[in-house]
Image (spheres, rainbow, N blue to C red):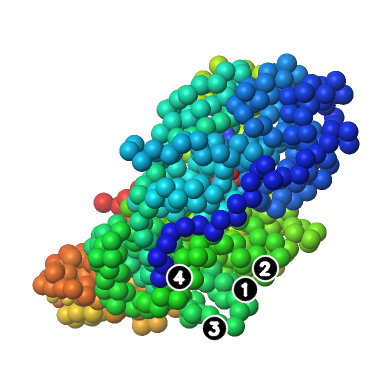
Amino acid sequence: MFLSCALPRPYLLASDTIAYSVENAEMTLKGENASELAKIFGNRLITAKHELIIHSMDVGSLPKQVGWLMNTNPDAMVQPETAQEVQLLYDFARSHRIPVVPRGAGTSGYGGAIPRKGGIVVDMRRMDRVLSVDKESMTAVVEPGISWANLQFELNRHGLDLRCYPSSAVSATIGGWVAQGGDGIGSLKYGNINDNVVELEVVLPNGKAIVTRDTDLFCDTEGILGIITKVTLKVKPLLPIRSIVVSFPENYLMVFAIERIMKDGPLPFTMRFEESKYTDLKKRSWAEKETFPFPVHHCVLLVAYEGTDEEIAQGFDVVREVCEELKGTVYDEDVALREWNDRFYPMRIKKIGPTLVVGQAFAPIENLEAILDDFQFEQASAHAGIDGYVTSKTGVTMMGYFLEDERRRFFMLSWSQSFVIFKIAQRHGGHPHSTGIWLANYAPVYFGTRRLGRIRAAKLKLDPLEISNPGKVFAYWLPLILRVGKYFMWLGFDLFRNGFGRIAPIPLKWLQNLPPIKWLLRWGRAHSPWPVQYGLGCCMVDGAAAVASRWDLERFGMLPLFGPRQCDVLWVSGSLTKKMAPRLRRIYEQMPDPKFVISFGQCAASGGLFWDGYSLVTPPDKVVPVDVYLPGCPPKPSDFVRAHLILQNKIRAGTTHWQQKHESQDAMGVVK
Ligand SMILES: Cc1cc2nc3c(=O)[nH]c(=O)nc-3n(C[C@H](O)[C@H](O)[C@H](O)COP(=O)(O)OP(=O)(O)OC[C@H]3O[C@@H](n4cnc5c(N)ncnc54)[C@H](O)[C@@H]3O)c2cc1C
Ligand code: SF4
């Protein structure tokens, strides 16, 4: 457990950086232009080739083939120290029509800080002062180039603290996170970065400096509308923060626990989760004397509370209670302290890479379990994992990690894996974490059409020459090429990694979705359901009667069996307890695709007689996706027949959960 919330202090001040000389310049900017720029920036104009190469990329490992599609090499880099210098830079850029690309620490991975058309990279890290701290209004005015870690150090000296920060806080800058958008540590309690910005000073591409509260225009927009030169941030009093760490044997138990902890106790400061494949990778990278604390294939949850000892203890009690009910294991203070300190190093698993391909996405919390399940299924043979933060009562932000080796000839194919987490999240109602270059064609989803319309109008007005970070947010052909290309990359990746075994289902799936074949399959599936029973209460006797001679369910093509591996319909009836829920899930997972679920009786649907029982999981679709609910206590054998007829109709119409996920949608018509 943890008694202080301070970040490690790297404290490398921008003023410590090395001075560069213009004499060695290899600029493609024409000579006289270069000297004009040198007049503004002196030895803070950098043209050394190795520096420019470093600033032609961000934290992502970019395959060289993607680099062929654009000019990522800047012509020069400048390091402004004042807003006036940024104004002069824009004047220079406008008169020579040279792109200007603002940059913080380059820790974003979607290309926002990478030049697309060469130009001048503007390294903001020399503007790293804390200008004022106001304890009354609980705000701090800072320059954009200071890192979150350094700002927290300064705030702590005034008895104040950050309300939220990214897990890249040790290097990421304030301006970078504001311009990139997102949420992270502390967002569960205090909102995302936009919620914490009070005011911005921005130098617009037309050279004017403005002070604005219009976060809709200047947050998240990757510097396409100007360079942020001052930020007024909300801050909070410095309070002790302590964490508790628990692990669960199944993903869905962890998701239950997350929801329960938020519902039953005080709102935690932050909650970080690690899915079980990620924990396994972490174990492989654990080269230390201490034994690895978590069992194989366990998911890990860190919950941090802030406040007085009583408030924290109250939170911990709720976590322990929830854990006891959901088969969680609570770890000791040492593990909690270690996990808390490790929150800044989620990418440590890179050392077993050697390359780490990373993707990021937002998703609704209610679909987190489905996302984790899909990820584990689709990435079963990959060295991959997910970790993330619960960032609001309804949403999570997740990072997907894939271990690779960029020295391999076909690394380009693996790079496409960075989109996998986003693809899965999107399937379950999620959206991209930012637009950058690679996801620019998802800008309407990310911003919403209204906000995007405002941003576009402002861009046309403020930057008609498109010099401020061109090719971001409003990029068209490159993301389109990547969008099409990435399907081929996925195919190629699977072919190389898994042979035809994983490729074959792709054309098969396509074939199965061709209308005549799809209808034929639906017809076949609707008329030959093979149920497996999971009877937990008395109504299963009525189920048995339904298959016997009097009601004769077999006349509908149904064949009741006892092995889940041969069946495609799961019957759940009776009281589903927390103890039995994992078994139900396991049976469901053992069934082959396609699969459907019917829930019989009042007990399964709502608890029935035991509606307020402490140990019930109702309704069962928290555990398996139920297609038909049949109420009644007991449901009669004729009701079992009726449930099957309803299921038949749903299968023919393609509206069962499985079909909605795996089939293209076009209802064939429900039989009345
Ligand atoms: C280990 C790790 C953990 C991370 N954790 C999180 C997390 O928890 N939450 C999260 O949201 N993200 C996270 N990220 C992504 C990234 O770190 C953040 O988005 C980060 O805040 C970007 O800051 P930066 O200073 O590196 O900006 P950069 O990457 O340099 O720039 C980001 C964008 O902002 C623009 N920009 C930079 N400075 C300015 C300025 N002054 N004015 C205008 N535009 C500007 C750039 O042009 C670019 O488009 C993580 C990344 C890593 C590597
Ligand atoms: S719904 Fe009624 S019949 Fe079915 S298990 Fe519950 S009490 Fe028994």
Quick one: SS at disc 1?
loop
Residue position marked by numbered label 1 in the rendering: 285
Question: Residue drawn 79% across and 26% down?
Answer: 38
- Could you give the CA–CA distance between mark 2 and mark 3, rounded to whole angstroms? 18 Å
First-in-chain label (1 vs 3): 1
Binning the other alpha carbons within 10 Å of mark 4 as few (below 14), some (14 to 19) or many (20 upward) gives some
**On the rendered structure, is 292 left or right of 87?**
left
Sooner in the amino-acid sequence: mark 3 or mark 4: 3
Describe the element under mark 3 as helix, strand or loop. Answer: loop
Residue on which the image places disc 3: 291
Ligand 1 within 8 angstroms of badge 1 C-beta = no
Q: Dividing the picture into quarters, in which one does residue 309 lie? A: bottom left
* Figure quadrant of residue 302: bottom left
Q: Are marks 1 and 2 in contact (CB under 8 Å)?
A: yes
Note whether 570 is above or below 509 in the view shown: below
Q: Residue at x 68, y 54 (%)?
A: 415
Residue to which mark 2 is pinned: 351
Nearer the N terminus, badge 2 or badge 3?
3
